[in-house]
């Protein structure tokens, strides 16, 4: 009886969540229309003979000016296509790389791509080109962007003891992509305020349409996801790493290492801000795993871990 | 060379000091201590959530700990390492990674460096060259497969994990 009630409560809660999501979607759509129409209005009117007193700008909006949000290529309802996800991920990644460049070590980058792609193969996700990069920062953190863009910092990489730990970290980030966590954030209210106000980036290759969707620069990476998304990425990621044949305790070992880090450390301030405490992540993962992975024998591959310069 | 010496000496210390070399931890859920690192072995004691333990060693998904007068094996995911509430400098030696405290060279390397922060990310300007560099490093499926094969990694079928029921108390980063 108790469980039934709980199931009911949970399903009710999730329904209301969906409803809220739609409301936010509608809000976002209205706002988008507003912004786009405003852009239209402020555009210089096409050169035309001054035939009448009526200027183009003053004319009432015609049906043509009503913007079909579908034209944007971004579904505000339902799922984004793989191409749309990739377009969003590319813009976020280009911005992130504007803040922190890649480590100039081709051997390291290739190694991380090989491990990451092998783990990503176990997700069953199709139509994705996965990109992995080690960022030249002593910060301790890792990031994922939609469409298959994954980053970890040199500071985090240095703390790893074997390939299974690397696989565990990458698997957690890969899970953010397969579970579309950032896209869910985009569809919620948090970024509506930034919509249309994103600093115009004249940089070559920058996608202003996507930039308007994601806010300024790579700030979406500083906002973080909700706790449940992090717990889910741990739960899904540990399984991806296990499926790839790695020791399943790679990710838990990294979490243990982080649990023991001192709090007052510049290198972890962003991590602290955007993630639940590792002790909570261990506890949540412990509830989910219990004895279910006891019989899995994976490889740690300590010797193959690429030695960073 | 120096890099190599640190873990080796830490390991030797662990071995020579044996039980004297313990690091603190806290039990995260009501658990059992087993006589062996397997749930089929004898239960030595029950430990309640919040119990302080000393972590003695690690084997796969298990930690050998002492809790009060009992010693036994507990699941890795049922314990958090570190000093926790006691104002802590982290102690991560059981987990192999040198902590900031035990590896002074690392502290020197970071001194004066500011970590990544919100403002850096917000102000970030799109860098097409770095993105191109990233995308040029992409590897193919077959390259990843042969890389896995080289070290004997074989894909195994592991079912997904169920979503556990919600609600656990939350820890604060401030307590680290």
Image: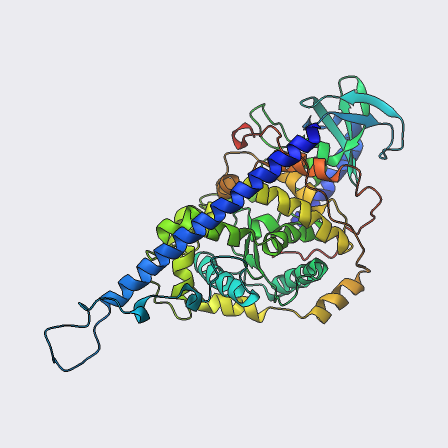
Residue at horizontal 41 percent and vertical 50 percent from the top: A191
Judged from this view, the residue extending furthest toward the bottom is A49
Q: With respect to residue A167, does B85 lie above or below?
A: above
Residue at horizontal 34 percent and vertical 60 percent from the top: A33
Judged from this view, the residue extending furthest toward the top is B69
- Percent from the top left, x then y, of residue A273? 49, 40
- Percent from the top left, x then y, of residue B103? 61, 40
Closer-to-camera residue (B91/B140): B140
Residue at horizontal 67 percent and vertical 60 percent from the top: A120
Closer-to-camera residue (A103/A81): A81
Please give left or right for residue B146 compared with residue A157 in the image: right
Say if residue A225 shows up in the picture.
Answer: no
The C terminus of chain B is located in which quarter? top right
Please give left or right for residue A233 compared with residue A303 in the image: left
Q: With respect to residue B51, does A197 lie above or below?
A: below
Closer-to-camera residue (B12/B71): B71
Say if residue A103 shows up in the picture.
Answer: yes
Judged from this view, the residue extending furthest toward the right is B41
Please give left or right for residue B96 compared with residue A190 in the image: right
Q: With respect to residue B72, does A109 lie above or below?
A: below
Instruction: Using the rendered view, name the quadrant where residue A207 is placed.
Output: bottom left
- Percent from the top left, x then y, of residue A243? 76, 54
- Percent from the top left, x then y, of residue A140? 55, 46
Q: How is the image coloured?
A: rainbow
């Amino acid at each position: 009886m108790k469980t039934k009630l709980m199931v009911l409560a949970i399903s009710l809660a999730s329904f209301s969540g969906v409803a809220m999501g739609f409301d936010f979607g509608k809000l976002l759509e209205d706002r988008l229309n507003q912004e786009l129409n405003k852009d239209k209005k402020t555009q210089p009117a096409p050169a035309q003979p001054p035939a009448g007193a009526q200027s183009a700008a003053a004319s009432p909006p015609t049906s043509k000016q009503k913007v079909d949000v579908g034209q944007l290529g971004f579904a505000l309802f339902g799922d984004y296509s793989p191409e749309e996800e990739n377009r969003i991920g590319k813009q976020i990644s280009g911005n992130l790389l504007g803040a922190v460049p890649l480590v100039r070590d081709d051997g390291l980058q290739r190694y991380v791509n090989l491990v990451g792609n092998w783990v990503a193969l176990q997700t069953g996700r199709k139509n994705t080109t996965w990109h992995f990069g080690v960022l030249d920062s002593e910060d301790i953190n890792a990031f994922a962007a939609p469409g298959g863009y994954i980053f970890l910092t040199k500071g985090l990489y240095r703390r790893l003891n074997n390939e299974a730990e690397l696989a565990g970290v990458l698997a957690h980030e890969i899970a953010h992509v397969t579970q579309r966590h950032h896209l869910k954030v985009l569809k919620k209210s948090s970024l509506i305020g930034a919509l249309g106000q994103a600093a115009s980036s004249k940089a070559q290759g920058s996608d202003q349409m996507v930039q308007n969707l994601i806010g300024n620069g790579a700030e979406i990476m500083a906002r973080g996801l909700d706790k449940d998304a992090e717990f889910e990425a741990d739960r899904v990621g540990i399984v991806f790493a296990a499926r790839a044949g790695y020791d399943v305790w790679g990710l838990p070992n990294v979490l243990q290492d982080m649990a023991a880090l001192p709090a007052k450390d510049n290198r972890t301030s962003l991590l602290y801000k955007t993630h639940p405490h590792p002790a909570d992540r261990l506890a949540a993962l412990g509830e989910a795993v219990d004895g279910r992975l006891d019989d899995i024998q994976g490889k740690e591959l300590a010797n193959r871990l690429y030695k960073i310069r | 060379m120096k890099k190599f010496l640190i873990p080796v000496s830490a390991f030797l210390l662990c071995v020579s000091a044996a039980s004297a070399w313990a690091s603190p931890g806290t039990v995260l859920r009501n658990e059992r201590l087993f006589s062996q690192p397997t749930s089929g072995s004898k239960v030595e004691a029950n430990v309640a959530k919040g119990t302080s333990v000393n972590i003695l060693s690690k084997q796969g998904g298990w930690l050998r700990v002492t809790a009060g007068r009992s010693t036994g094996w507990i699941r890795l995911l049922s314990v958090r390492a570190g000093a926790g509430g006691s104002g802590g400098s982290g102690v991560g030696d059981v987990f192999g990674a040198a902590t900031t405290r035990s590896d002074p060279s690392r502290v020197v390397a970071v001194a004066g460096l500011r970590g990544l922060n919100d403002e850096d990310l917000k102000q970030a300007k799109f860098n097409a060259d770095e993105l191109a560099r990233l995308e040029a490093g992409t590897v193919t499926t077959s390259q990843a497969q042969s890389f896995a094969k080289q070290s004997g990694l074989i894909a195994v079928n592991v079912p997904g994990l169920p979503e556990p029921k919600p609600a656990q108390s939350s820890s604060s980063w401030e307590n680290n």
